[in-house]
Image (spheres, helix red, strand yellow):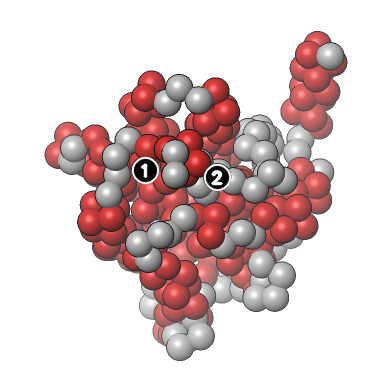
Amino acid sequence: MSKAAHFQKPENISIDPHRMGFEFNSDELPRDWLFNSPMLTTWIESLSILFPEGEQFFVDTVRYYRDQIDDPEIQKQISGFIGQEAMHSLEHKTFNSYMKEKNLPSDELDAFVGGLLGSVRKVLPKRMQLAGTCALEHITAMLANMLLEEENGEVRDNMHELMRPLWMWHAIEETEHKGVCYDLYQHVGGNYAERTFALILATSILATVLAYYHTRMQYRNGTLFKVKDVLWGLNKLYGRRGIVTKLIPEWLTYFRPGFHPWANDNSNLVERWKDEILSHQAEKYQRAKKVSKLHAA
Ligand SMILES: [Fe+2]
Ligand SMILES: [Fe+2]
């Protein structure tokens, strides 16, 4: 198989960035906007805090290697990946600022992850950093699939309608570009031992940081000792049929020697949701897109 043949994505998938221009208004958005639960809401809010610095790290690791790619189609996919992650950072920064207004420690925790990733940049070799990005992209693709899937859409269905577009848009684009980093990693000589070790390492660090953030967020939220909600939330996340527990089989597929992100072709989910979610794009960005299309014509 030629190296280029590794770069496979379904033809119905395009990797285009979209600036959405989301705004979050505390008069309209209830505080407990996921499952009406402080525990679940602060859990997903903790994830949001990780995105701006985390996604900048992803972009940097991919940029470092992109010069090694000659194929213009692959270069286009990498540009799409970088553009999408940059937009995710921007939109989540807006939401993280909203949390700061709510007196949650989003700024402080954002700075913490920036420091942590600064150390990772210094300590780990470049290709290991890229392997780490691939591993975290596998995890984000799993979370994205969980949000988009038709049958088990309980997280999506229990999310307040004002928050759903942000997370669904992010999930759609994570699905669209889920193969890009992995294909690049294979192209620059990545190997099974390194990538699977990176998954274990990245998952351990993510789980530890997320648990710390979640605890801090709940504490500041004044809900850390709401025992009933905390126990309910723990079961909802990590119980036998918990949101995180149900992701384990997909997490394990990364250990298959022939793994590829698109082995699970869920492009139908992108088709199912994309138009509906893009209708939430702020008018000024829809207009900007139409003008640039007109100039291109
Ligand atoms: Fe992203
Ligand atoms: Fe991503």
- Residue corresponding to mark 2: 8
- Rounded to the nearest angstrom, the CA distance separating label 1 from label 2 is 12 Å
Q: Quadrant of residue 285?
A: top right
Going 63% across and 33% down the picture, which residue do you hit?
17
**Residue 23, relative to residue 77: is it above or below?**
below
Left or right: where does residue 130 sit relative to residue 282?
A: left
Q: Position of residue 273 (x, y in %)?
A: 75, 55
CA neighbours of label 2 inside 10 A, class few (<14), some (14 to 19), many (20+): some
Is residue 13 shown to the viewer in this render? Answer: yes
CA neighbours of label 1 inside 10 A, class few (<14), some (14 to 19), many (20+): some
Query: Hey, what amino acid is under mark 2?
Result: Gln
Q: Position of residue 133 (x, y in %)?
A: 36, 45
- Residue corresponding to mark 1: 186
Left or right: where does residue 75 sit relative to residue 156?
A: left
Q: Quadrant of residue 287?
A: top right
Relative depth, front residue between 230 and 254: 254
Query: Hey, what amino acid is under mark 1?
Result: Gln
Say which element carries label 1.
Answer: helix
Kindly check if marks 1 and 2 are in contact, taking CB atoms under 8 A apart as contact.
no
Left or right: where does residue 230 sit relative to residue 126?
A: right
Q: Position of residue 82 (x, y in %)?
A: 50, 31
Relative depth, front residue between 250 and 117: 250
Relative depth, front residue between 226 and 70: 70
Quick one: which residue is furthest to the front in this view?
A: 1
